[in-house]
Image (spheres, helix red, strand yellow):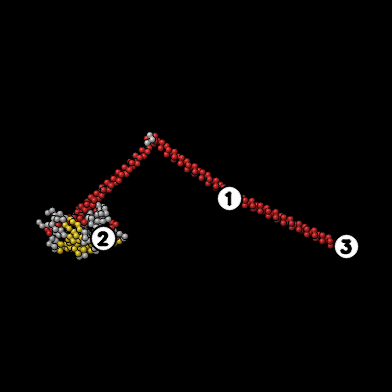
Amino acid sequence: MRERKNERKGRGEKERKKGGKKEREKRKKEKREEEKESMRERKKDEGRREKGREGKKEKKKEKERRRRERERERRKETKEGRKERKKGGKERKRKRKNKKGGGKEKERKKERKEGKKQRKREGGRERERKRKKEKERKKERVTGVYMNMHSAICASPPLTQRELRAHCKHKLHLRAAVINMNQLPSNLNYDHTITGNAPKVVTVKNGHESHFSVHPPAQEETLDQFRQVAIQSLLENLQGWSTHSFWWQAVPLANCTPLLPIPQRIIATLRDSNQNHVGIAKAELRVVEKKVEKKMASKLCPPEEEGELHAFHIPKEGRKEQRLVARWLIRHPPLNLQVDGQVILSFSDRSELWPR
């Protein structure tokens, strides 16, 4: 009996245990289902969110595309409109012209063209005439400068370099002009003789020749006055030589390569009519850069002691601008002008030039 009871008991326990297992499995199954469901829900949500994002992007793109389309249309319309308006204006103009001339537009066009050509031809002639006139005027101005040099030399006080340079802008004549009557062309290495009333010859060492004459001075002229005339005449006739002195040049600036080196020192020997030595005057020359010119000025030439300092441009192709600074100790023109001991210019008394 007891055994049977125990048997039943054991079977019941087993059953109960089995029932518990089923329950657990059931719960597990439900849990899994729930998890799956929640997973599905989550995925759905994410998909919706993603879709929403994509939708926004799409909308934005669409909006931009439509805007571009509208812009394109608007531009097209304005362009077309402009063309139309332009065309309309041209058409109106053409009609108006035709109306005026009774349809003779072609002839009028031809006439206009001819007129234009004629004006062009006349304009060219006019320009040529003006150019020639200007050339003549410049020539006159050049000779005027040379003629003015006599009065500049004689001026008391002498004209300044600036005043004289105002007359000397053209590239074919004096660049820095004469300030005192002692300033003769110093690096023209030439022998110079004057005899009688005939045209005189100056033979330059580089082979050039120039003929010029010095007119006999009036009886009342002093020797100094005559010397001034001679200097002026010489300078006038040097015009056109392709030789450079340190303050004048007779060629365009582009070709400025001096034929002779600039002398470091000029010694002017003063002699009277009997060729007696009466004194020596000196001028020192230096080529300096522009920036040191002021220093040189103060060193070379205290104004109260030795007279004025004159700076002259020396353009040289392919180099920096240089200037020549000269210290002039002479106050009147020499009879003999020497460069480093060699006589390059000699003026004589008029009694030796022209017999009475």
Q: Does the image show residue 222?
A: no
Residue 4: give x, y in percent of width and height. 88, 62
Estimate the spatial distance between the alpha carbons at disc 2 and disc 3, rounded to whole Å.
151 Å
The mark found on residue 258 in the picture is: 2
Q: Residue furthest right?
A: 1
Mark toward the start of the polypeptide (2 vs 1): 1
Q: Residue at x 13, y 60 (%)?
A: 273
Q: Residue furthest bottom?
A: 341
Q: Residue at x 36, y 38 (%)?
A: 107
Image: 10 above or below 83: below
Identify which residue, 283 or 83, lies in the foreground: 83
Residue at image mark 3: 4
Kind of residue sitting beneath label 1: Lys
Residue 145 falls left or right of residue 78: left
Discs 2, 3 touching: Cβ within 8 Å: no
Estimate the spatial distance between the alpha carbons at disc 2 and disc 1, rounded to whole Å.
82 Å
Q: Quadrant of residue 248?
A: bottom left
The mark found on residue 57 in the picture is: 1
Identify which residue, 253 or 113, lies in the foreground: 113
